[in-house]
Amino acid sequence: MKLSDFDFDLPEELIATRPVNPRSSAQLLVAQGDTLTDQHVFDLPNWLRPGDRLVLNDTKVIPARLNGRRYRDSQQGPVSARIEATLLDPQADGSWSALVKPLKKVKLGEEIIFSERLSATLQRIEDGQALLRFNVMGEDFDQALESAGAMPLPPYIAAKRPADEQDKTDYQTIWARHSGAVAAPTASLHFDEALLGALSAQGVSFSHVTLHVGAGTFLPVKVEDVTTHKMHAEWGQVSETAAAEIRATKAEGGRVIPVGTTALRLIESAAKGGEVQPWEGETDIFIYPGFDFKVTDGLVTNFHLPKSTLLMLVSALIGQDRVRAVYRHAVSNKYRFFSYGDASLLIP
């Protein structure tokens, strides 16, 4: 299985840099059997059945991109340097791993000031990443970060424009609850209260799980034999309640449909024994063609990058030939791609 098997040509103008408004007015490409149907996300109730269950990732994206300065005395007097930091993962000791640019401008033990309320010292460097210890923790840290930070937009959006205040709303799901992600579960960005109400009235149920999406979700696959690729690990949790709800839906003949690849990867991690069980920990599950799905009956997802692990995941679910047809249709019909783009409903 070669990396080139998951490549396709995407016109630059189809990469969305802003979401549509309202959220649920995005286009929805429904792939069911051999049929492709052009719809909108607000049409989802027409495609789901009473007894179906949507699995939602309730992680909350933190404004993880920070701009600050480090100050130093020199023979010429006080000097400073502009420093950018993108937070990646919280550590057990309360520090954060981060990408710091330019890292060579900061010495161990030096302080980087991001705002009047937020600063950090460089503790150590591991594998090109900085370990930062902040001056505040807990709720004080959350509040200071909310004020000083910007949303960590994906590289293909950040290359086109800087993050702004609107992204703090746009790049967050309406059910975001548990802080810790540095990337959004983007299929969930299409859902608004009106759509949730319509789905509930249709007899569709919801279960919440948590997977803190890491920056590794944007890392390219660099090996030609995709089966040798090593996934980044992300922390997740499936509660006893969510596991019981999903098992009950399966037992009653309903379909379990994750909203987004993150929710899918998490419930399949929790179902390695055959059915979903309560689960907590780090998962580096890699889903590519040939994977044996234990619980997933369909997927709501956006359109993914060429040669990405997410494209391999959807190929595992509905087949590589089917995915090629879906993406050819999406490109020719000018669907919007990636995090702020349109969505698909994939039924194997």
Image (tube, grey):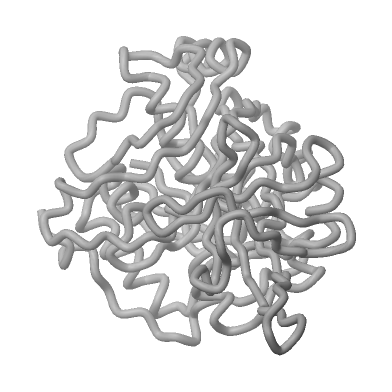
Please determine whether, in this image, residue 72 is positioned above or below residue 347.
below
Picture coordinates of residue 98 (x, y %)?
Answer: 55, 55
Please determine whether, in this image, residue 265 is positioned above or below residue 72.
above
- Taking depth in this image into account, of 106 and 330 the one nearest to the observer is 106
- Taking depth in this image into account, of 302 and 37 the one nearest to the observer is 302
Res 218 quadrant in image: bottom left
Please determine whether, in this image, residue 31 is positioned above or below residue 281.
below
Q: Is residue 343 visible?
A: yes
Picture coordinates of residue 139 (x, y %)?
Answer: 84, 37
Task: Give the total of numbered labels.
Answer: 0
Left or right side of 283 for 146: right
Q: Residue at x 78, y 38 (%)?
A: 137
Picture coordinates of residue 145 (x, y %)?
Answer: 78, 53
Left or right side of 253 for 287: left
Q: Residue at x 40, y 39 (%)?
A: 233
Left or right side of 61 for 234: left
Q: Quadrant of the C terminus?
A: top left
Residue sitting farthest toward the right: 116
Left or right side of 197 for 220: left
Picture coordinates of residue 7 (x, y %)?
Answer: 24, 69
Q: Is residue 24 visible?
A: no
- Taking depth in this image into account, of 313 and 227 the one nearest to the observer is 227
Q: Residue at x 38, y 28 (%)?
A: 268
Q: Residue at x 54, y 81 (%)?
A: 159
Res 171 quadrant in image: bottom right
